[in-house]
Image: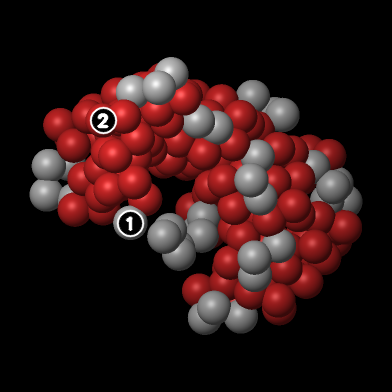
Amino acid sequence: MMKTVKTIMVMAAGLLLLVASASPTAAADAKYYFELGNSQYNEEKYDDAVKSYSQAISEYPDFIDAYHNRGLAYYHEEKYGEAIADFSRVISKGTEDAQIYQMRALAYLKTGQDEYAIGDYSKVIALNPNFADAYHNRGIAYAHTGKYDEAIGDYDKAIELKPKDGNIYVSRGVAYVKKATEDFSRACDMGNRNACDDLKELSK
């Protein structure tokens, strides 16, 4: 999981916007709370980091980097709804950063919003076609919705890109079993006794 937040190097560029649209005092206060939040985040003090980023945002409501980093802190606190809201705020500004879509997709997965996760992972893949984890996680989302063929296709691509990751093979194996179970169940319902026997074996 990504743990390092955006650093002061990112903040330096953001300060140009702060100076242009906020008072010098507000800009300085926003910068202070943002940097404090980064330090707290990197010490895994996520609740404190959320408070600091929130203070930075109160000083400068369009401080996109603060929304980004607060979303990461919320994610680590397992406050996925809040994380999604902050990531969405960043995305609404037109970012083409694959990381932010990846983080929102993970939050969608955590909250069972699989179709939204699929959409975000598709965006990640469009931005970074060689990102194996995006294919793997999109495959998981597809599997959650019963789309096993699509899931297996994503697992195949993930294995091609990351052949030594055993977790992907497990995910693909589960998808094959789920798909086989569906096929045996249909055949059994049609009166095929062999399928009924195979279904019993799979159910053990």
Q: Which mark is residue 12?
A: none
The residue depicted at 12 percent of the width and 42 percent of the height is: 163
Q: Nearer the viewer, residue 91 or 37?
A: 91
The picture places residue 30, in percent across and down from the top left corner, at 76, 60
In the image, residue 187 above or below residue 79: above
> Taking 110 as reference, is 63 left or right?
right
If the image is split into quadrants, where does the N terminus sit?
bottom left
The residue depicted at 54 percent of the width and 78 percent of the height is: 44
> Taking 67 as reference, is 162 left or right?
left
Q: Earlier in the sequence, mark 1 or mark 2?
A: 2
Q: Which mark is residue 194?
A: 2
The picture places residue 203, in percent across and down from the top left corner, at 37, 50
Q: Are marks 1 and 2 in contact (CB under 8 Å)?
A: no
Dot 1: few (<14), some (14–19), or many (≥20) neighbours within 10 Å?
Answer: few
- Furthest residue toward left: 164
The residue depicted at 82 percent of the width and 65 percent of the height is: 55
Between circles 1 and 2, the one closer to the viewer is 2
Residue type beneath disc 2: Asn
In the image, residue 168 above or below residue 196: below
In the image, residue 25 above or below residue 143: below
The picture places residue 196, in percent across and down from the top left corner, at 35, 35
Q: Which mark is residue 204?
A: 1
Q: Secondary structure at mark 1?
A: loop
Residue type beneath disc 1: Lys
In the image, residue 185 above or below residue 77: above
Q: Nearer the viewer, residue 104 or 99?
A: 104
> Taking 32 as reference, is 200 left or right?
left
